[in-house]
Amino acid sequence: MVNLPQMEYQRRQMLEPLKGLENITTDGVRVRLCANIATQPDIALAQENDADGVGLMRSEFIYLENMAPPAEEEQLEIYRFAVESFPGKRVVIRTMDLQSDKQLPYLYQTKENNPALGIRGVRFAMTYQNLLRTQLRAILQASAFGKAAIMFPMIVSEQEVRALKGILQEEMALLKKNQIPFDPEIEVGVMIETPAAALMSDRLAKEVDFFSIGTNDLTQYTLAADRQNPQMEPFYEPQHPAVLRMIAITVKNAHAAGKWVGICGELACDHTLLPLFLTLGVDELSVPPAFILSVRQYIRQMDLSKSKQKALEMIL
Ligand code: PEP
Ligand code: MG
């Protein structure tokens, strides 16, 4: 047993009985509770904490660790291990969300004054398209071994999504031609983490299978408050009604198109907002593995019929 500080040890002991239980309110409202993961140790933590799957696998580390671009086989091994670790459960793999504040030794990247407003997320992926194509082929091949899903970050328009889906189709055709197995029905989703994406979510919903709301960036871009600048802390307010309204719009538009919607930003752990998220009908919350059981505990103590009205007042 690792020598944990006494309080942390007691906290874990207290949450232990929640393993194997449903994420259901006292009045019968259910939600999936998944894990945000990056590297391999997170997978074990997610399993240990009884995750319903992976709502966000951040793939950036694969690009940051090496002096050369990660090979297709190397990536396939990483994604395959992830999907095989959650049999029957979905593992959402987000394509690389890189930006110019992290210079990669194997690329020529222009330095930018505002990297968060620059070549980031799918803009990066489209600029260095060969890296994206390799990653997509690796994820597709992993989909033959479990329930993988692909998610694109930093989307602002449906044109972008169509272009990305076009590239995905081309890579699928290539694998098919070479008789390499993959799941042709693999789900494709986008992150809603810009105000543009939230406001256009009615149109985006027609293009994809699911949304995942990234509240960390949605807060930064909605409130014009740099999430990495400690001086901006008083202005970086994820509970701001403007952010909550963006979430409400997104959930409504996803459901109107018959698509599922999750939240994978840090706000998903905020228990004061759980009544709002469940009232809106959010289908999935994806949180760091260590928070899964405490969020489950809050959900299981909640009577939504009593807290609904007050929760909705937050977005009035
Ligand atoms: C987010 O923006 O909320 C998110 C989950 O993505 P990341 O924190 O990796 O930018
Ligand atoms: Mg983000």
Image: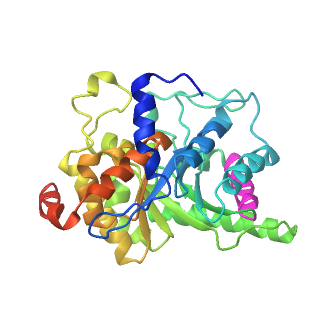
Locate ligand 1 by image quadrant: top left
Q: Is residue 18 left or right of residue 65?
A: left
Residue displayed at 44% across by 72% down: 259
**Residue 229: x %, y % from top left:** 35, 25
Position above or below: 94 against 258: above
Position above or below: 91 against 63: below
Name the quadrant containing residue 183: bottom right
Q: Is residue 78 left or right of residue 280?
A: right
Name the quadrant containing residue 30: bottom left
Residue displayed at 70% across by 73% down: 184
Q: Is residue 41 left or right of residue 70?
A: left
**So how many labels did they put on this image?**
0
Instruction: Answer whether residue 35 is magenta in the image.
Output: no
Q: Quadrant of the N terminus?
A: top right
65 or 171: nearer the eye?
Answer: 65
Position above or below: 1 against 141: above
305 or 19: nearer the eye?
Answer: 19
**Residue 31: x %, y % from top left:** 39, 63
Residue displayed at 38% across by 45% down: 294
Q: Is residue 139 left or right of residue 283?
A: right
Instruction: Answer whether residue 140 is magenta in the image.
Output: yes
Q: Quadrant of the C terminus?
A: bottom left
Q: What colouring style does the render use?
A: rainbow
**Residue 65: x %, y % from top left:** 68, 29
Q: Is residue 173 visible?
A: yes
**SS assignment for the magenta stretch, majority:** helix
**Residue 275: x %, y % from top left:** 24, 57
Q: Is residue 246 visible?
A: no
Residue farthest along the right direction in this orientation: 178
Part of the protein shown in magenta: 131-144
